Image: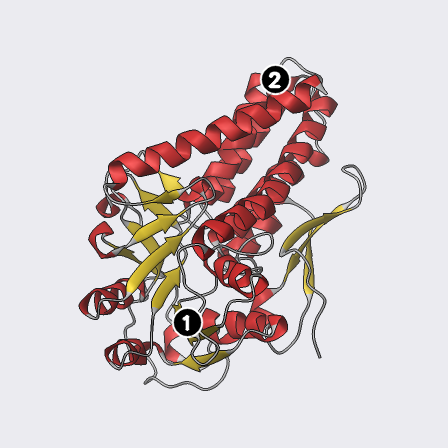
Amino acid sequence: KKAKFYRSVYWDGDYKTGKLFMVDQPKLPASFETITCEDAAAVAKCIKTMVVRGAPAIGAAGSYGMYLAVKEGTYAKGKDVVEALKKAKAMLDASRPTAVNLSWATKRILDLIEANANAKPDELKKLVWEEATQICDEDVAINKRLGKFGADLIPGGTPDKPTNLLHHCNTGRLATVDYGTALGIIYTLQEQKKNIHVFVDETRPRLQGARLTAWELQQAGIPQHLICDSSSGFLMRKGMIDVCVFGADRVTANGDVANKIGTYMLSIAAKENNVKVYCACPTSTIDLSLKSGDDIEIEQRGKDEVTGLTIDATKGQIAPTGVPVTNYAFDVTPAKYLTAIVTEEMVCYPPFEKSLPEAVAKAKARLASSRAEKKSA
């Protein structure tokens, strides 16, 4: 039975009486449930425990977390709202350090409120909520523009033979507010009626591919096969993969990509077998302040994700009790292994030091134009 699609992060109701909901992703695919967050601390906990995950979705959650931090507060003046938001930003940003979209979203809201700090506190509260809502709405539009750029790069196969895509982790409706980045490209290919088939990496240790991407593709009716992570190189060597696609949690100025652990090995195997590699991400994931992937803080997570068959190791222990575990959540793929980075503004090719700033500048110009139109309306 197909589930109704919800946004992964959504506000239900008006800004005063409404509530923040998120799809409870660890429950998937066994059950589809949502969870309510009443305050910023609850949002931070959901981010840290991966109730919500995926860089764009984390950014959306963080933006509403900023609103919840001030929603019920009593403030004498606008500057007091600013101070409360600064504290909330520090807490939310610390919940997951690798994905830049989180700090990008909280900074965007803080910058806006600082620029309007002379307004009344209640007006600023509403402004925070409106900006968080806009960030969510923009994410959906951004993903659909990105999907079209990416789909133009990928042939649609023939009636007898589909184009075979290899997808790592989960980058779809669950990882973004809606639609997706790398999976958004796949959805666009489907909408264009191109003949495609997807090999889905299971993506150990939290199995985002097996639990989430396979579920999403089932809901969408897209042909797929689930594979173990370690088989991808062999499939490429056999000529069974035409294109590799994945998302990003942070992209540095030189084009290095931090993404779910296993992306680096996948990209090396693709290079060895002459398979094109496309990273798909919104410009909000591009961090031009960092020169290379060596500057990215890589999150390490708990041992239970690795020692058990379930993502919290409540059952199915597979490792000896007490064995030491190293569990990096992300790796960094050097830019030399990428064919291109697909954004909502353009397809960025090497040298990335030139193309990435161009894409970011176009996105900033689009936002400025949108705000100007909104102000004049």
Q: Is residue 86 visible?
A: no
Q: Is residue 91 visible?
A: yes
Which residue in the structure is indicated by mark 2? 116
Residue 319, image x, y percentages: 34, 84
Q: Quadrant of the N terminus?
A: bottom right
Question: 212 or 272: which is nearer to us?
Answer: 272
Q: Is residue 114 above or below residue 61?
A: above
Side of 98 where 148 appears, left or right? right
Q: Quadrant of residue 28?
A: bottom right
Please, what is the three-letter code of the amino acid marked with disc 1?
Answer: Thr
Residue 5, image x, y percentages: 68, 63
Residue farthest to the front, as pictured:
159
Side of 44 where 361 appears, left or right? left
Which numbered disc covers residue 163?
1
Disc 2 and disc 1: Cα gap in Å?
51 Å
Q: Residue at x 64, y 18 (%)?
A: 78
Q: Residue at x 54, y 44 (%)?
A: 142
Residue 229, image x, y percentages: 34, 76
